[in-house]
Image: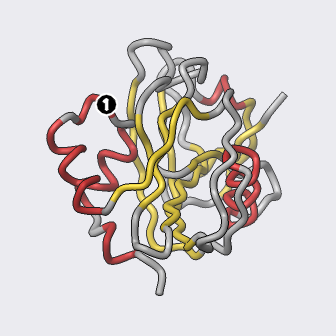
């Protein structure tokens, strides 16, 4: 069984909770992360969530996301998930955080997350080797193209990624 870290509105750990239970019945605020990984050309790696994902299946989103395990640092968890989902390794740095709430009509589950956003740059020679249970597809896109896509067809993207793109200048986070 997988557990998440339940937090207060300031992001301070309160307790742990079984992951799916934390997403049921309106959800409970818990710690999460979203990774934005850029290539040397400054393009962002997007993923389409696998059709079998437990919530928000089949939607386009940021490079990877997930939850730190109890006792696991956010950056450590993000680097772990990057390897698990995409077979990639990169050094990540935090850039912001936000709280959001979103309900998935298809699964009946609710996201209520205190999300840390981390960015990194992938060396040119590395290419994704995605886990098909996690990703249905992936693509590199320039930040301007990402903003246009989210504006044109918001329902094709996860709610946390839509919010991130709308509220933050993603292009400003491209690592040097």
Foreground: 149 or 104? 149
Where 49 sits versus 15, above or below? above
Q: Position of residue 96 (x, y in %)?
A: 44, 69
In the image, taking residue 10 as reference, residue 166 lies left or right, namely left
Q: Residue at x 67, y 58 (%)?
A: 78
In the image, taking residue 142 as reference, residue 129 lies left or right, namely right
Q: Position of residue 136 (x, y in %)?
A: 55, 29
Where 58 sits versus 61, above or below? above
Q: Residue at x 50, y 13 (%)?
A: 107
Q: Residue at x 62, y 74 (%)?
A: 123
Quadrant for residue 2, please give it.
top right
Residue that lies at the very extreme toward the left in this rendered image = 152
In the picture, the quarter occupied by the N terminus is top right
Please tell me whether mark 1 sits on a helix, a strand or a loop.
helix
Q: Which residue is mark 1?
A: 156
In the image, taking residue 92 as reference, residue 40 lies left or right, namely left
Q: Position of residue 165 (x, y in %)?
A: 29, 55
Number of residues whose C-alpha sits closer than 10 Å to that of mark 1, classed few (under 14), some (14–19) or many (20 or more): some
Q: Position of residue 58 (x, y in %)?
A: 46, 25
Foreground: 20 or 86? 86
Foreground: 57 or 19? 57
Q: Residue at x 82, y 57 (%)?
A: 71
Where 78 sits versus 86, above or below? below
Residue that lies at the very extreme toward the bottom in this rendered image = 176
Where 2 sits versus 20, above or below? below
């Amino acid at each position: 069984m997988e557990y998440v870290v339940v937090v207060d509105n300031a992001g301070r750990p309160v307790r742990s909770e079984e992951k799916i239970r934390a997403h049921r019945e309106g959800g409970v605020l818990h710690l999460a992360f979203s990774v934005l990984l850029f290539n040397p050309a400054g393009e962002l790696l997007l993923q389409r969530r696998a059709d079998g994902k437990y919530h928000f299946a089949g939607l386009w989103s940021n490079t990877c996301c997930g939850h730190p395990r109890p006792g696991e640092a956010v950056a450590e968890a993000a680097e772990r998930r990057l390897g698990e989902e995409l077979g990639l390794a990169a050094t990540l740095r935090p850039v912001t955080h936000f709280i959001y709430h979103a309900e998935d009509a298809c699964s009946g589950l609710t996201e209520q997350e205190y999300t840390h956003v981390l960015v990194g740059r992938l060396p040119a020679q590395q290419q994704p080797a995605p886990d098909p249970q996690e990703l249905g597809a992936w693509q590199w896109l320039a930040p301007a193209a990402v903003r246009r896509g989210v504006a044109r067809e918001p329902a094709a993207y996860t709610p946390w990624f839509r919010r991130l793109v709308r509220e933050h200048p993603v292009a400003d986070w491209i690592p040097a």
